Amino acid sequence: MLAFARSPQEAVFLSAVFCGCLALALSGLLRWRGSPRVPTDLQIPAFFVLAYWLTYNRVPSLPPVGAVNKLFYIAVTGAAAGLLLEACGLTAKLRWFFLGFPIVAAVFIGQSRLSTAPHEVVLAAGLGALVFDLLIREMLRSDGETDLRPAIMLAIASTGFAPIALLGASSSSLQLCLSLAAAIGGILAWHLFHPRFSFGAASLLGGAGALVAVGQTVAMITRKVDLLALFILGLVFVVPLVGERLLSQRPVTRPAIRTLRFAALCLIPALAAVSLAILRYDGNFPV
């Protein structure tokens, strides 16, 4: 929590506003200067790290002990590995490496569960790999407009997961996810009309990988999250597979309209997941 915040609610609000405004300013600067692919690709993992620091007020020591501390290094390691792969030109050739990242993350986070509930670790790893597979499909299409789509899915999934995590007894994940979503929104604001955003390996491993790891942590460690709601939220990443047919029935020429229609489709499973989690929650709603 932010040290100067007077309440948990204020800490969440200030953290999200700060990340969103800073992302808006930084993304605008990079857009104005015509920065190359690498700085743009680093924005999402960088803002995850910032959101983590604002949420937990610390940089975990090495080696990290506890699932929450491991999240920080998953983001940092993922971003570094992504940059290395981009520099070597191996992004399109190492699909199986990318799919292995959430599997390794699940095992890393769920070490304490391997002996008592290995099926939970296997399930978390498998679902994480499935999400990555769907994101990779969009990432490898690599044009200015479709590069926005993985980031849009991440922002909406992060926003939807925040209240689900709160109801699953993880208030810190609420702040972390809302701050990340606000940052992604600030980043993409400059690319709505003339997209030049880059969603590359660093964004995938350091940004999406970290967010998937947050979901794995809440599911395996707190064990109070609504798994059905979490499954429905995961349908956000299926939208590109089914949305193309719907969108193609009424084609539009303006990129901004196409992007907004795609975002609207992604909101449907996210809103359904949050609504279901609220309806199925049987305790006093945490405020």
Image (cartoon, helix red, strand yellow):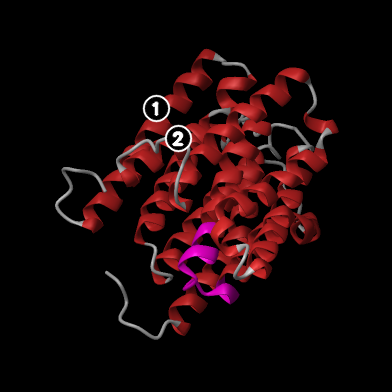
Q: Residues within 10 Å of mark 2 (few under 14, many from 20)?
A: few
Whether residue 225 is in magenta: the answer is yes
124 inside magenta stretch: no
Q: Which residue is mark 2?
A: 62
Residue 238: x and y in percent read 72, 60
Vertical placement of 263 versus 53: above or below?
below
Q: Mark 2: which secondary structure?
A: loop
152 and 163: which is toward the camera: 163
Give amino acid for label 2: Leu
Task: Specify whether residue 202 is in view.
Answer: yes
Q: Is residue 20 visible?
A: no
Residue 22 in picture, x, y percent from top left: 37, 31
Quarter-wise, where is residue 197 in the image? top right
In the rendered image, which quarter is residue 89 located in? Answer: top right
Which residue lies under the disc numbered 1?
A: 25
Image side of residue 131 versus residue 73, left or right: right
Q: Which residues are magenta?
A: 217-229
